[in-house]
Every structure is written in C-alpha cells, then in structure tokens.
Amino acid sequence: MPSPFPGMDPYLEGYVWPDVHHSLATQIRDQLTPRLRPRYVARIEIQMVVDETPQSEIGILYPDVEIVRSQRRLFPPRPAYGGLLVAEGPAPTAASLLVQMPEIEVRLASVEIYDTAQNQLVTAIEILSPVNKREPGLSKYRAKWRELRGTGVHILEIDLLRRGQRPLRHTRIPDCHYCVTLSRAHSSGVHVWAIQLHERLPILPVPLRPPDADITLDLGLAVQGIYDRAAYDLSIDYAAPPPPPELSADDLAWLRRQIQSANSAPTVFPT
C-alpha cells in the first residue's frame, strides 16, 4: 500500500525515523549509482554520535523511559551515600529525586560521492536527523558543513523533519514544513527548495566535477520506494495524530482528507 500523501509522509517522522533515515540513504545510493558509473561511486558513510539531549524525543523518536524516579528516604544504621560508607554521625539528608541521564547512541547515515580516478570526495548528501537540529548536535553539524564547504565539496542537505531548528537560517527562506538546500563548491550562494506538506518532493540536481553535468535525484521516488519496501503502512497508526509539532488547522484538515481518501480507495491485489 502506498503512502496516502503525495510528498513526505509526516508519520515517518516518528519512531520509525531511524529506519527511514538509513533506508533513504541506501535508496539514494542505489538510485544514483547507475548514473554515476564509471567516473564516480556513491558510498554510505555512518557516523556514530551520542544524543546528549534526548529528552525532547522521548515518546516521539525514542521509546518512553523512566527519566525521573522517586527515591525513598531510607536511613540505615550506618548510612551509605552513593554506595560508600560514611563516618559515624548525623545521617545525610536523602535527595528527593534520582535523575537518570540517558545516553542514546545514534547512527547517522549520509551518502558520499567520490571520483574513481583519485578517490576524492566530490559531493556529500546529508540527511538530517533530530540530533542535527538541536544543540549540541546542531553546532557540530554546522561545523561539519563549514569544513566540507571549505574543502570544495558540494553539499546537498535533505531535511524531512518538521521539528527542530534548521541549520541554514535566512530571512528570505519562507516558513515551510520541509527543506532541501544545495551548496555548490566554490559558490557563495545556496539553492533552497522550501517544501510544504501538500507538495510533491522535488527532483534535485546532484553536482559533480566539471566538465561533468549534474545528475538528478528523484527524492519523491526515493521516499515512496522505501515506504513500499519497508511496508510502513503496517506499522503506522493513521488514526492517531502525526508526530509533533502540531499542524495548523488547515494542514490537519488536509491531512485527514488524504487519509480518508486513501482508506476509501479500493484495494487492488496483484494477479
């Protein structure tokens, strides 16, 4: 069953996002490889990072966990504090709370295009995750972006998440649900695709080295491909609200119409 939405499916931004993220990187590589041969290759780069501030993603991206636990006030005859025996004397005042500080390791996948002659990085395709869109991960990602730009690498950045802060801020970029940017090597400008929920995902240029012309990436085809291959329709509850942030009344009404239309469509079984 295809997604009920013509472009990005906002329900993919929830707990299935880690699978979406890695599947999309693979789908992009597979779509580009025939167009890159024989002068270029596409490789998936995996970066392991620790999500230091996961609290906002609990119940959205990460499973619900117990973050704050009440601590009973116990006073043993020879009190211990932090597992260590303390000297005789007044018992230490018990803390009212024990705050767990979870450390969640995140695997971030990107697609890197190398030339086959010198094995040099030509183009980086970055697929943003929530950890890239809030501190401290946001600053770390921006530093990586500047480093790539400084070494003359094209950067195609794909942001299919509505929540979080976008790395690129500019007064001319309109409010939008999703965003794609392209920074060409040795160019001072950045191309921006501002995408609304009801719009189809664009066909994007992927620059290579001169004199080679751009190839294209059909982002909508890639997203639909992973939706079908992973059977996300069997995991997503479309009767529930989409993941945060909340949509406007008009956008939510449009979303409900799309879901109702998909549910009323006749099921066609392969023969």
Image (cartoon, grey):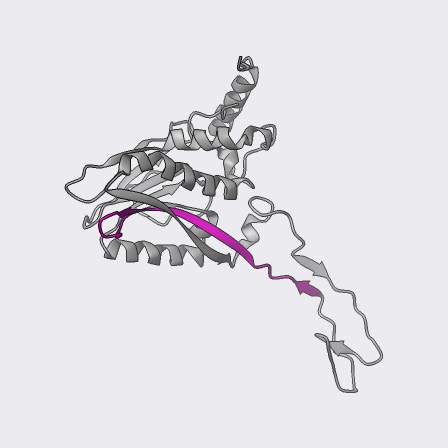
Q: Residue at x 85, y 79 (%)?
A: 77
| Left or right: where 12 falls relative to 151 | right
Residue 220: image quadrant is top left
Q: x and y percent of residue 217 in the render?
A: 32, 34
Residue 5 vertical placement versus 140 (above, below): above
Q: Which residues are magenta?
A: 97-124
Residue 209: image quadrant is top left
Q: x and y percent of residue 53 in the render?
A: 52, 57
Q: Residue furthest right?
A: 77
The secondary structure making up most of the magenta span is: strand
Q: x and y percent of residue 61 in the render?
A: 55, 45
208, 83: nearer the viewer: 208
254, 115: nearer the viewer: 115
196, 271: nearer the viewer: 271
Q: Residue furthest left?
A: 211
17, 29: nearer the viewer: 29
Residue 8 visible in image: no
Q: Residue furthest bottom?
A: 88
